[in-house]
Image (cartoon, helix red, strand yellow):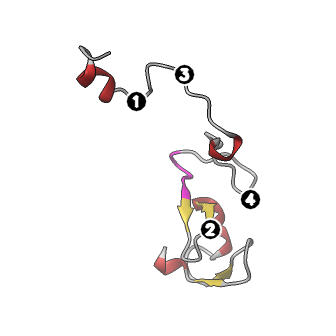
Amino acid sequence: MVGKRNEWQTMKQLPVPVELDREFQFRAIFVCLVSEEQATKENPPMLMSCGHVLCKHSITKMSKNGTKAFKCPYFPSDIDSAHL
């Protein structure tokens, strides 16, 4: 490993398996709470001003194509789609 230091530092994965506690394990795929669809390149997850995340299509639908503010489904706050 010492001789290949630069090689393993540029890899996207560690060369050895590392066990993580449950608190550090996350879903690899985002599923939108509103549409219950997996995120894709055409429908990416988007961070709203309240800090919550929904897929782009859900935000577009709830905001009437970006023309109206809408309520966050996680927390009762108004979201202005123009500031996303």
Q: Residue at x 64, y 48 (%)?
A: 30
- 83 horizontally vs 3: left or right: right
Mark 2, secondary structure of its residue: loop
Measured in 3D between alpha carbons, the distance from the residue under mark 4 to the one under mark 2, in whole angstroms, is 10 Å
Please identify, in this view, whether the residue under mark 1 or under mark 3 is nearer the observer: 3
Crowding around mark 3 (Cα neighbors within 10 Å: few <14, some 14 to 19, many 20+) is few
In the rendered structure, are the residues bearing label 1 and label 3 in contact, judged by CB atoms less than 8 Å apart?
no
The amino acid beneath tag 4 is Leu
Q: Nearer the viewer, residue 43 or 1?
A: 1
Please count the marks in the image: 4
Measured in 3D between alpha carbons, the distance from the residue under mark 1 to the one under mark 4, in whole angstroms, is 29 Å
67 in the magenta segment: no
Residue 82 placement (x, y as % from top left): 48, 80
- The mark nearer the N terminus, 2 or 1, is 1
Residue 84 placement (x, y as % from top left): 49, 73
Q: Nearer the viewer, residue 22 or 66?
A: 22
- The mark nearer the N terminus, 4 or 2, is 4
The residue positioned farthest toward the front in the image shown: 2
Q: Identify the magenta region.
A: 41-45
Is 45 situated above or below 9?
below
Measured in 3D between alpha carbons, the distance from the residue under mark 2 to the one under mark 3, in whole angstroms, is 31 Å
Measured in 3D between alpha carbons, the distance from the residue under mark 4 to the one under mark 3, in whole angstroms, is 32 Å
Please identify, in this view, whether the residue under mark 4 or under mark 3 is nearer the observer: 3
Question: Based on the displayed image, in which of its 4 quarters is residue 21 positioned?
Answer: top right
Q: Nearer the viewer, residue 23 or 26?
A: 23
Residue 28 placement (x, y as % from top left): 61, 39
Q: Which mark is residue 17?
A: 3
44 in the magenta segment: yes
Q: Which residue is mark 1?
A: 12
Q: Which mark is residue 52?
A: 2
The amino acid beneath tag 1 is Lys
Please identify, in this view, whether the residue under mark 1 or under mark 4 is nearer the observer: 1
